[in-house]
Image (tube, helix red, strand yellow):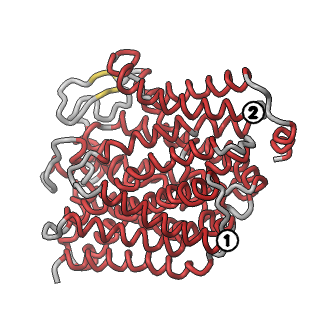
Amino acid sequence: MSSSTFIMIAIVIYLVGMLSIGAAYSRRNKTSSDFYLGGRKLGPIVIAMSTEASDMSSWLLMGVPGLAYFCGLADATWTVIGLALGTYLNWLIVAKRLRSYSQRLGAITIPDFFSHRFGDDSGVIECIAALVVIIFFVPYTASGFAACGKLFTNLFPDMNYIPAMLISAVVIVGYCAMGGFLAASITSLIQSIVMTIALFVILVFGIRSAGGWNAVIENAKTVPGYLDVFANTTIQSTTPGKYGFITIISTMAWGLGYFGMPHILNHFMAIKDGEKLKISRRIGSIWVVISMSVAIIVGIVGFAMSSKGVIAPFESNSAAEAILVRISTLMSTYGILPALLAGVVLAGILSSTMSTADAQLLAAASGVSHNIIKGVFHRKLTNKQEITIARVAVLCIAVIAAFFARDPNSSVFGIVSFAWVGFGAAFGPLMLLALFWKRCNKYGAIAGMVTGGATIFLWKYLVRPLGGAWNIYELLPAFLVSCVFIVVVSLCTPAPDSEIVEEFEKA
């Protein structure tokens, strides 16, 4: 049998395993809380690893190595530092408070939490928040489907993109619709393990193929500024630029997005014992730092391999994101065991995308079934009816996402970074102030979500093109503008009712 056959065997085993988990947990969903939060019964290790797996997506196994390969240490390092800080602070200051407060309010989604927190009986806050979730998560999920489809077509040139993308979508929808949040969390735990194995297997194989660690470093030194975290360069540059303070702050601002990511925040709400979130924080934060650091090193090792002629070089940053695929393909030619290991690596890339897509799919579906139908339109549903509607919503959202992902050359990937900014600006400041400032009211909440989202577009298309000091990643100014409007509008409008303040103090 050919090496591609063994790769396919490993991937098929992985996909069947994911569907089996969904089927195994399908009967455990008795209420909407079970379907969307696993009944708040998850342990600290599952929460830690499923949270980070759903966070990292293909960015870990494709984006980071590709960026390090083509641009050296600076861009990748400062981005990773910002993400690592954002991850740790989110666990430290948000997780426990959100877990306690959301349970006290009976909230099982982020729009649900905002609505209950501010006592908004009109449904305006829940409606706006749910629309934000749906609008940004549909293309985000589509990008996951597309990434899976492109992976298969790169591995197996005879396979058409549409069937490959649809097979991936069917598997993700299958275990999500059957098993809900619990199945998605268990599969994400497994996926985090597969992702870790993939990184270390590629690292060891890559260093050996490049001629050893010293050869990797010597090759990196041939590009001016490649190993300098304060130099802006690419492998095609002869003279590096300066990676200045504004660029560093702008790059690190990616970390602010964590405070508003529904698919991450939902995991905080799902742990069985809030006191054990400290364990989750340590495990999750350590895994993030180690895995992203290894991903950077893999990119540098990949550059050494291409310089030596072991693999073909990449001509652009986006093309370099396929570095793990190319190294895995090479590894598969060394025999049966290496081919199976290559299959595990490629399953890791697949799982990094699927672990994010499933969490996003559930969050988007909850916006439709729980927040719009039940929350905004006040339709009374039994637990069985709500779970049925939730499953139908998962299917419908997936169909729409698959439609967006139908073109392999579409610009859906450009929307992914915009979705990160959207959640970070619309939900991030509000989440922090909702948890830590009792004077925050519903008027400030609405103002913060609207202005945060609007500032993204204004800054990206009108201000940032001016360049210079204005060339700042739009999440940072949008985040600050949202904070200001929440505080100012809250102070200029009536204070929250005594019942809301009392609930805040108890929570």
Which residue is farthest bottom? Answer: 1
Question: Looking at this view, is 166 or 10 the one in front?
Answer: 166
Q: Could you say where residue 401 lies in the image, as x and y percent from the top left?
A: 36, 57
Q: Is residue 311 left or right of residue 75?
A: left
Which image quadrant for residue 379?
Answer: bottom right
Q: Residue at x 33, y 17 (%)?
A: 467
Residue 118, labelled with which disc? none
Q: Residue at x 28, y 69 (%)?
A: 342
Task: Give neighbour class at mark 1: few <14, some 14-19, many 20+ (Cα, 10 Å).
Answer: few
Which image quadrant for residue 243?
Answer: top left
Q: Residue at x 42, y 24 (%)?
A: 458
- For numbered disc 1, what is the local secondary structure? loop
Q: Is residue 267 left or right of residue 251?
A: right
Q: Is residue 267 left or right of residue 232?
A: right
Q: CA distance from mark 2 to mark 1?
A: 35 Å
Question: Looking at this view, is 308 or 316 the one in front?
Answer: 316
Q: Could you say where residue 463 lies in the image, as x and y percent from the top left?
A: 39, 19
Residue kind at label 2, given as amino acid type: Trp
Residue kind at label 1, given as amino acid type: Thr
Q: Which residue is mark 2?
A: 437
In this rendering, is residue 374 above or below 222? below
In this rendering, is residue 333 above or below 67? below
Q: Which residue is mark 1?
A: 382
- For numbered disc 2, what is the local secondary structure? loop
Q: Could you say where residue 98 lies in the image, as x and y percent from the top left?
A: 70, 49
Q: Could you say where residue 244 lies in the image, as x and y percent from the top left?
A: 39, 21
